[in-house]
Image (tube, grey):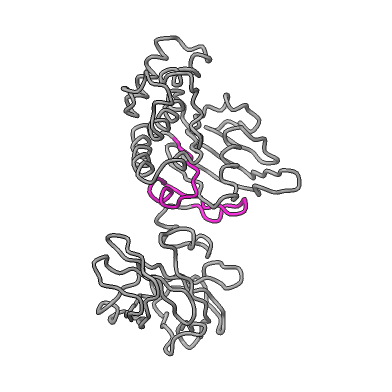
Amino acid sequence: MNSIEIKKLSLNFGEVVVLKDLDLSIEKGEFLVLLGASGCGKSTLLNCIAGLLDVTDGQIFINGQNVTWYEPAQRGIGMVFQSYALYPQMTVKGNLSFGLKNAGLPKEEIENRVKHASEILQIESLLDRKPAALSGGQRQRVAIGRALVRDVEVFLFDEPLSNLDAKLRTELRVEIKRLHQKLDNTMIYVTHDQIEAMTLADRIAVMRDGLIQQFDTPKKIYNNPVNKYVAGFIGSPSMNFLKGTILQDGKPIFKLEGGLDESPDLSNYKFQESIKAETQVWLGIRPETIVTGDEAKNMPVNFSLEVEVFEPMGADTLVWSQIGGQEFRFMVDGNSSVNVGDRVTVGFDPAHASIFDIDNEERL
């Protein structure tokens, strides 16, 4: 049985449509990430699941029970917000136990739950401190602990790491993953950070304008994006997109717009359907699949580019260039000597490329 089932869910604010006829099934024990840019509807969907917003249409099921019109406290969920939302006058222990006391649980049960949560989150030494005496990462652990003590099957996270610095985000991301492995509870996590999504999720729902663009495993979304939006949103650095035309001459040949003398041979690329001659497309190539130097000369497609800008990133250097007047990025080894104005031979295997329709931007 699925842990959460969303059927034909819609939400309007007046005439503004925020969520549009969404269907989503989340398995028991799954870590689902709702990913998208600001305003795509991901936090709104999470709030609908939590019962913080009344839906316009559709149904929400949790553990087989229709909870569409249940109050948040009746849904059996624990929620962690972007802001820590801790009571400043209470100690950490007080914050963890406050909701349990209001629910009327026995004192011994409260003590056991607080102890268990603090051990899992490694905050035993902080129980007597107040929030003002805690770091940002410690406060977020307490906020997670407050949801954890409720002993529920479903946890909802609304961008819990966005207020933290980069190092703390990385550390807490690992802790959240460990937490999921220990508890094996269903978790739904909202973020705009695709690195968080790729590293945490069992499956990712990529959202745009109130719609789910693609719902699949991180690996499948990365390797087989269903459209140009998903392809550009997933991956860091983002995918290169080259505008051109498919020439049908026994095998698919891509002619770059304003580009190369010799067009790349795409005969290794497996199309989902036949493409007619003179079809305009986007050719998508991830920077990390592009090789340089002698290795590039052995690739089915290779050409020379001039370095315009380079960004040292430690182990790798990201190089910005142009091909046929179109922006093109690729990676070189961080120890390589790269200077503005240098010419670099680059190459790629078209079997690792993606092709999208120029009009509807769907994968071909």
Q: Quadrant of residue 115?
A: top left
Front one among 145 and 140: 140
**Near-viewer residue (206 or 344):** 344
- Could you tell me residue 276's position as x and y percent? 56, 81
Which residue is pictured at 58% across the width and 36% down the height?
49
Q: Which residues are magenta?
A: 186-215
Point out residue 55 in the picture as x, y percentages from the top left corner: 67, 38
Q: Residue furthest right?
A: 15
**Image side of residue 143 versus residue 60, left or right:** left
Residue 243 is situated, as x and y percent measured from the top left of the image, at 52, 77
Residue 165, relative to residue 308: is it above or below?
Answer: above
Outermost residue, top side: 107
In this view, 104 is above or below 268:
above
210 in the magenta segment = yes
Q: Residue 71 at what x, y percent from top left?
A: 62, 26
The image quarter in which residue 176 lies:
top left
* Residue drawn at x 46%, y 21% as measured from the top left: 95
Work out whether residue 279 can be spotted. yes
Task: Tell which of 253 and 96 is nearer to you.
Answer: 96
Residue 248 shown in magenta: no
Camera-nearest residue between 279 and 337: 337
Residue 1 appears in the rendering: no
Measured along the vertical axis of the image, is residue 193 above or below residue 95? below
Number of marks in the image?
A: 0
